[in-house]
Amino acid sequence: MNIIIRNATVLTMESEDMVKGDIGIKNDRIAFIGEKPESFEPDYEINADTCLAMPGLVNAHTHSAMSLLRNYADDIPFWEWLTEKVWPVEAKMNGSDVYWGTMISIAEMIQCGTTAYADMYFHSEETAKASCEAGIRCSVAKGLIGSSDEDEQRFADTRSLYQEWHGAGDGIITIMAGPHAPYTCDPSFLHKVSEFCSELNIPIHIHLSESEKEIEESIKNHGKSPIAHVHNIGLFKHHTLAAHCVHLLPGDIQLLEEGNVHVVHNPLSNLKLGNGTAPVMEMKQAGVKLTLGTDSSCSNNNLNLFEEMKMASLLAKGKTFDSTVLSAYETLEIATINGCKALNLDGTIGALKPGNKADLILIDMDKPHWYPHQNLKSSLVYSSHGSDVATVIINGKIVMEKRELKTIDLEKVKYESQRIVERII
Ligand SMILES: [Zn+2]
């Protein structure tokens, strides 16, 4: 289908400049931006007079099915939260629960302008299935926890996930390996993960250096930081999505910069769980590749990247006592372009330009908190709401138009998520 978006204010993210014009989409790709070529015949037209068009946001770290646990375990210490609240309830969850939990998250993410996300959980074929049906781009990783003789089965599960789902939904589903964290995977298991990733040529999605306790235990057990530990094992030779990196020891930043690592900053989850704040500006200045995630709704408690962008920018300014750092545009880069690279999708999605896949959002600027229209990049990061997103297009398909979800039966999803929670909690 050929879609034309008329008269949008376009932030391509190729540069900071705004362009006023039309956007043409032919099947799954952007055909042109600016003036419509004679030869382009649209089948469908969207009026974007009052809208800003930009690349969709990328949530580079979440556990989408955990939206079932939203507002279930708050205001308690991190370790108690994880081991006494989250893990026991997760043990009761089946594949169907993960499907519906993922679906409620996808509905929320699309409504807040997220067009791609990286997920780590279990029953991950259900995450892939829900994402495929809803039409959202997803890098799926099955969480791997290893030290037992079930190792082979765990790798077999990820291998079959890869065989069944990698490239599904016209390429919107990709697969990563998901070793949960160095404190839940012993060294021999992580060596196997590394060999496994070489064999399938897939990236890694892992939690690293999230809490102080993790650092203390890593030093006690391995004599080094979690980052140095997994670097020694060889994980960083693979494309690695490293969530958190909050507590860093001397030398860690250099290892992150030198490795094939994309650090996912999750400011709200780190704050809410009392884990502190990542040294984002030190990492950025050292050339570490940075992107943004929400983590799950059990520690955030939503998946709204507009909130995350504002928090990331303000935290960086507050931490460094410097209001010039992490500008609005730099924050937008972290949440869009950098996210595409982190999900290993550079060259597929990214800036709005002809030839790239059409993953874009239209944001309604005709709202009081957008007026007066001055610096629109500032509006996006400092004063907009996720609910300003009007229309979302992913892989050339309209998945939301004028806030109406096109691929999700929201009433059914709400009903099912409530029904599940009454059983498992
Ligand atoms: Zn996480």
Image (cartoon, rainbow, N blue to C red):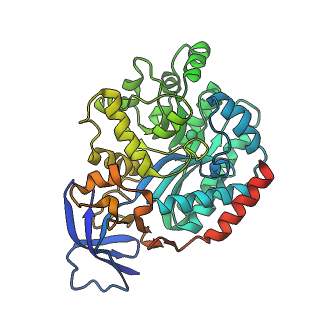
Residue 110, how many percent across, how many down? 49, 62
Q: Is residue 344 visible?
A: no
Label total for image: 0
Q: Is residue 194 above or below residue 56?
A: above
Residue 338 at what x, y percent from top left? 36, 47
The residue positioned 58% from the left and 47% from the top of the image is 297
Horizontal and vertical percent position of residue 146: 69, 33
Residue at position x 57%, y 45% in the image: 296
Q: Position of residue 217 (x, y in %)?
A: 61, 18
- Left or right: 218 with respect to 227? right
Is 322 on the left or on the right of 63, as rendered?
Answer: left
Residue 184 visible to the viewer: yes
Vertical placement of 287 versus 94: above or below? above
* Quarter-of-image position of residue 380: bottom left
Residue 273 is left or right of residue 23, and the answer is right
Q: Quadrant of residue 300?
A: top right
Quadrant where the N terminus sits is: bottom left
Q: Quadrant of ligand 1?
A: top right
Instruction: Give whichever of 372, 363 is nearer the camera.
Output: 372
Against 159, residue 77 (above or below) is: above
Q: Residue shown at 65%/30% (left/top)? A: 184
* Residue furthest out toward the front: 368
